[in-house]
Amino acid sequence: MPSDAPSPRRRQLLAAAAALGLGAAHAAPVAGPHGLPPAYGAMVLQPATLPRSAEFDLGPALARARAEGKRLYVYLNADDCAYCRRYEAFLAAHHAALKSHFAPYLLVDLRSSLRVPVRELRFKTPALGSLPYMEYQKAIGDERARQLVYPSVWLLDAQGQPLMQMPAGAGTFETVPEQIEVLQLVQ
């Protein structure tokens, strides 16, 4: 007679989920952590409204950048984006060569999901208020008005204005010299 009792491994997962305050629906294994590697000291913004919508309030990052006299390196990634994980692995593998080149920037890690439709992705700043992704891009003069692509990077000054037009998507920065060139070619 077959047993309906969970396997020992399933019981371990359920116990771990319960200890973390998660329901059984969250007990399934998930992908590893995402976002910029911790060694870069990024300011992480993860909205509570995932997975159906996401609003990122850039106000605190802009205020911190002004206070520290830094520019912003804003990185939009998705928890379920393989290309984002590839870029993050690149950054982790080349931390020693790249870390000093990021020094003039406050890194801002926007953590989203591919399940968020572009119409539900918003950016908020003190000067612009809350705007949908495409309207935000237009408002800051980003000429890349296009479909949402992960990962995306913006180099902004402390007032939230683009320092240069940035490429986006897979293959954006695949070598250390390419990454350094982007960080140093601020217009």
Image (tube, rainbow, N blue to C red):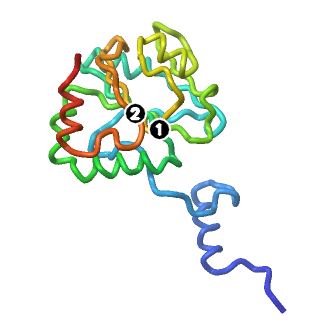
| Residue that mark 1 sits on | 150
* Quadrant containing the N terminus in the rendered view: bottom right
The kind of secondary structure element at disc 2 is loop
User: Farthest right residue?
Assistant: 1
Identity of the residue drawn at 41% across and 44% down: 35
Q: Tell me: 32 left or right of 160.
A: right
Q: Tell me: 12 left or right of 186.
A: right
**Total number of numbered discs in the rendering:** 2
Q: Which mark is residue 168?
A: 2
Task: Give coordinates of residue 92: x percent, y percent.
Answer: 28, 50
Q: Residues within 10 Å of mark 2 (few under 14, many from 20)?
A: some
Identity of the residue drawn at 43% across and 22% down: 144
Q: Residues within 10 Å of mark 1 (few under 14, many from 20)?
A: many
Q: Nearer the viewer, residue 111 or 77?
A: 77
The answer to whether the residues at label 1 and label 2 have Cβ atoms under 8 Å apart is yes
Identity of the residue drawn at 19% across and 41% down: 98
Identity of the residue drawn at 34% across and 38% down: 172
Task: Give coordinates of residue 116: x percent, y percent.
Answer: 61, 36
Q: Tell me: 23 left or right of 32.
A: right
